[in-house]
Amino acid sequence: MTSLKGDEKAPRQIREKRNGKSEELLAELIHKLNNPLTAVLGYSQILLLKLTGPDFQEDVEKIIREAGRISAILRELSDYINKREPKKEAVDLNELIRKTVKNKSGELPLRNIEISSKLAPVMPLTRVDPVQIQAVLFNLIENAEQALSEFHGQGKITVKTKVRGDHIKIIVSDDGPGISEPNSLKIFNPLFTTKKGKVGLGLSISHRILEAHGGKLGVRSKQTKGASFIITLPVTRELDEKETEK
């Protein structure tokens, strides 16, 4: 009888190969879908300028909105399968958060949502990919914004930082509806969502980005008591000579 001991890894290797092919196929499908979708959006916007009847305009606006939703879903899928390695550099996370909050503070008051930051007085530099970490922050803020808008049309979002030993914590909190305990156990699963027009990949992508940085993403919440998403990142004490000289 032939021993199977030497082939124990074969099933895993086969699965990984199949997953790789599936992701390549999905990437190609996204690319092919984007072309006609871009045409639909473009022609719809041209048509909207030519129509005069309000009923016709409303129908075309619905087409544009729905096509925009599909485009957003395709972008999320593309981000999910394109597993880019972090391009790390020495970053002051407080400064990155200030820029992020400032970027959002122009639009959120228009929706009756206040955003503020409470930052640690001393923040050590650490090595992260600033583009990826900012993308995580934007995702968490936008999730909080949608939760507040759907809950009572107003509210507060706060971004805090804390330094605990060799770790930095970034806490994004809101005073919205909170998350039920069953949902909090599934919230980082790919394709799980409770929000309209979302495909449910944002938190899963954020979770994966932080794992690639040696960090993690957690949630603390009670229904009707708001939600807090906690980013934990390691402090990298050693910097490149070039960065130290600066």
Image (cartoon, helix red, strand yellow):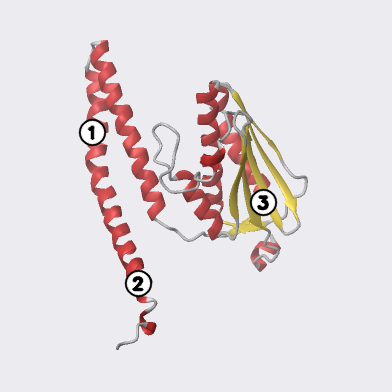
Residue 8 horizontal side relative to residue 97, left or right: left
Percent position (x, y) of residue 178? 58, 33
Q: Answer above or below: position of 146 versus 206.
A: above
- Residue at figure coordinates x 37%, y 39% from the top left: 72
Nearer to the camera, 119 or 16: 16
Q: Earlier in the sequence, mark 2 or mark 3?
A: 2
> How many angstroms separate mark 1 from mark 2 (CA)?
43 Å
Quadrant, the N terminus: bottom left
Give me the disc on residue 40: 1
2 or 3: mark nearer the eye = 2
Query: What amino acid is found at the position of numbered circle 2 in the picture?
Result: Pro
Percent position (x, y) of residue 123? 73, 51
Percent position (x, y) of residue 106? 56, 28
Residue 9 horizontal side relative to residue 143, left or right: left
Q: Which of marks 3 and 1 is nearer the N terminus?
A: 1
1 or 2: mark nearer the eye = 2
Give me the disc on residue 92: 3
Residue 5 horizontal side relative to residue 186, left or right: left
- Mark 3: few/some/many CA within 10 Å (<14, 14-19, 20+): some
Mark 1 lies on a secondary structure that is helix
Query: What amino acid is found at the position of numbered circle 3 in the picture?
Result: Asp
Q: Are marks 1 and 2 in contact (CB under 8 Å)?
A: no
Mark 2 lies on a secondary structure that is helix
